[in-house]
Image (cartoon, helix red, strand yellow):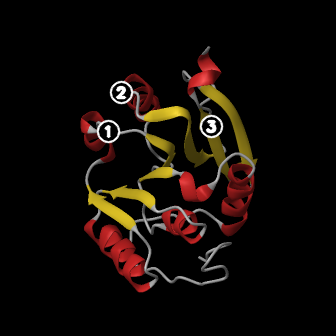
């Protein structure tokens, strides 16, 4: 995997092979950040990266100037890798080893962008629960965005606050916001 843009543009990162992850492809990540680049100033964002895995998305935000990033994953090895790269590149990424659903149930702060990349085999009910936790607990800022990465075989358009889905190869991003349900 590589960092697409920003301070560490072109930097290749090699994650340990034993991590239980499926990193977002460079093509999909570049397309996602092109969309976000037209809507946000990265240095002003607060980002919550759920199911962070290798930290691929967190590193991209940090390279582009975001300093308020929290990466959540339940696997110790993933958190350790994110911390290691964050320290090497002098990035300000806060990590939390936790189950994402338990973390969201107890979270009291808001974020501008919540990015979730759960395992593709996640139960459909769990996708719905993820969206419900974010919106019922008011975890997004007023102009905030929840982005869920998922397989092209998963349809999330029926969920509350759904706005649009973008597909890149086998990857899809579903976008949710408060305005979509008004």
Task: Please report the residue visible at 41 percent of the width from the left and 54 percent of the height from the top.
Answer: 51
Q: Position of residue 29 (x, y in %)?
A: 66, 61
Judging by the rendered image, the residue that carries numbered circle 2 is: 137
Asked if 113 appears above or below 87 in the picture, the reply is above
Q: Position of residue 165 (x, y in %)?
A: 70, 37
Circle 2/circle 3 CB separation < 8 Å: no
Question: Residue 45 got which mark?
Answer: none
* Earlier-in-chain disc, 2 versus 3: 2
Task: Tell me where residue 64 sits by quadrant.
Answer: bottom right
Circle 1/circle 2 CB separation < 8 Å: yes
Q: Can you tell which of label 2 and label 3 is closer to the viewer?
A: 2
Asked if 85 appears above or below 98 in the picture, the reply is below
- Whether residue 117 is visible here, answered yes or no, is no
* Earlier-in-chain disc, 1 versus 2: 1
SS class, disc 1: helix
Q: Quadrant of the C terminus?
A: top right
Residue placed most toward the observer, 155 or 80: 80
Q: Residues within 10 Å of mark 2 (few under 14, many from 20)?
A: some
Task: Please report the residue visible at 46 percent of the width from the left and 63 percent of the height from the top.
Answer: 67
* Earlier-in-chain disc, 1 versus 3: 1
Task: Tell me where residue 91 sits by quadrant.
Answer: bottom left
Distance in Å between CA atoms under marks 1 and 3? 18 Å
């Amino acid at each position: 995997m590589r960092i697409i843009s920003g301070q560490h543009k072109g930097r290749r990162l090699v994650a340990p092979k034993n991590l239980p992850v499926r990193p977002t492809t460079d093509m999909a990540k570049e397309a996602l950040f092109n969309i976000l680049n037209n809507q946000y100033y990265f240095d002003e964002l607060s980002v919550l990266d759920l199911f962070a895995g290798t930290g691929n998305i967190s590193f991209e935000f940090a390279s582009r100037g975001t300093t308020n990033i929290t990466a959540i994953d339940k696997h110790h090895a993933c958190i350790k890798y994110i911390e290691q790269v964050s320290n090497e590149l002098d990035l300000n990424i806060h990590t939390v080893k936790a189950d994402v659903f338990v973390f969201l149930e107890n979270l009291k702060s808001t974020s501008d962008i919540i990015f979730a990349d759960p395992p593709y085999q996640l139960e459909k009910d769990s996708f719905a629960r993820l969206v419900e936790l974010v919106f019922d607990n008011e975890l997004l800022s007023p102009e905030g965005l929840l982005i869920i990465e998922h397989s092209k075989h998963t349809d999330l358009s029926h969920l509350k606050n759904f706005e649009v889905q973008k597909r890149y190869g086998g990857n899809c991003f579903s976008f949710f916001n408060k305005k979509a349900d008004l």
